[in-house]
Image: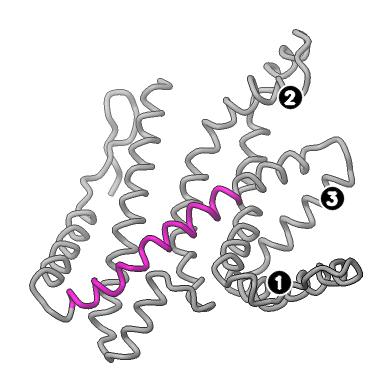
Amino acid sequence: MFRTKTPSGAPKEDFPYWLLVAVGIAVFLLFQIATNDIYSQVMATVSRGIGLTVFVTLVAFFCASLLGLLLALASLSGSIVLRQTARFYVEIVRGMPIIVLLLYIAFVATPLFIAAFNAVLEPLGLDLLRTRDFPLLWRAVLALTIGYSAFIAEVFRAGIQAVDKGQIEAAEALGMNGWLRFRLIIFPQALKTILPPLGNDFVALIKDSSLVSVLGVADITQLGKVYAAGSFRYFETYNVVALIYLMMTITLSLALRKFERTKQIQER
């Protein structure tokens, strides 16, 4: 019922039987893909969306991390205006489902932005923008960036606040300005706390990137939906779609756990 402990006092990890079962299922499905014409056709179709899924995930995560860091710094600022603005942004965005945010950005915010931009261009006699000039792919990336920046901002804020204040005071005593303190003292130490939850957010973003299919973006999920609707092979199609996502997310999750264990061993 209870985990045993190692001589160092750390709990002993259970043997990953769940992983053996997962690998067995994956091997079975990969065998089907290699030998079954229907599965191989599904894989050939759906795999064309892997590159787009990875692209959306990487770009959205990078932009969300930058925006999240700025929000975290604003929330810790000495200015009440910046603090309250950052808090308003984080609470509003975190309270909105990602799919609603996607639809709102794509079909409400984007047309409003283009209309406002055109109001500036028209008096200047310049060519006006059209809503369709802003591709749905980039609307999806923008929505995921905004959605995840709120969560990542809280990760950065917690990591920065976890840094020992004594070291910050020592840096001040040495005459370091705010930027030097942040770059040389605060951020490197906060990064140790930030990396694990940041990695979890990256894994979550891979899964949530499938929501861009509601905009018709040709990612893994959208290509699977189109193929299943045309062939009525829902069972085979969604087996393959699930396999692709699970291979990406479980692999990353295991890599993150390995990284955390390595870091814990190094700190002892």
Measured from the top left, where is residue 212 in percent x and y?
Answer: 51, 71
Is residue 48 or residue 167 the one in the foreground?
Answer: 48
For the residue labelled by badge 2, is the local secondary structure a helix, a strand or a loop?
Answer: helix
Inspect the image, locate mark 2, and give the three-letter code of the amino acid beneath it: Trp
Give the magenta range: 39-63
Furthest-left residue in this view: 35
**Which mark is in front, 2 or 3?**
2
Residue 138 sits above or below residue 201 on the image = below
Alpha carbon separation for disc pair 3 and 1:
25 Å
Please name the residue shown 31% across and 86% down the image: 228
Please name the residue shown 18% across and 57% down the image: 23
Is residue 196 rendered to the left or right of residue 3?
Answer: right
Q: Which badge, 2 or 3, is on the more N-terminal residue? A: 3
Q: Residues within 10 Å of mark 3 (few under 14, many from 20)?
A: some
Q: Quadrant of residue 66?
A: top right
Judge whether residue 55 is colored magenta. yes
Judge whether residue 196 is colored magenta. no
Q: Which badge, 3 or 1, is on the more N-terminal residue? A: 3
**Which mark is in front, 2 or 1?**
1
Alpha carbon separation for disc pair 2 and 1:
35 Å
Is residue 82 rendered to the left or right of residue 142?
Answer: right
Is residue 254 or residue 241 the one in the foreground?
Answer: 241
Inspect the image, locate mark 1, and give the three-letter code of the amino acid beneath it: Thr
Residue 110: numbered disc? 1
Residue 84: numbered disc? 3
Furthest-front residue in this view: 125
Residue 179: numbered disc? 2
Alpha carbon separation for disc pair 2 and 3:
22 Å
Is residue 206 rendered to the left or right of residue 87?
Answer: left
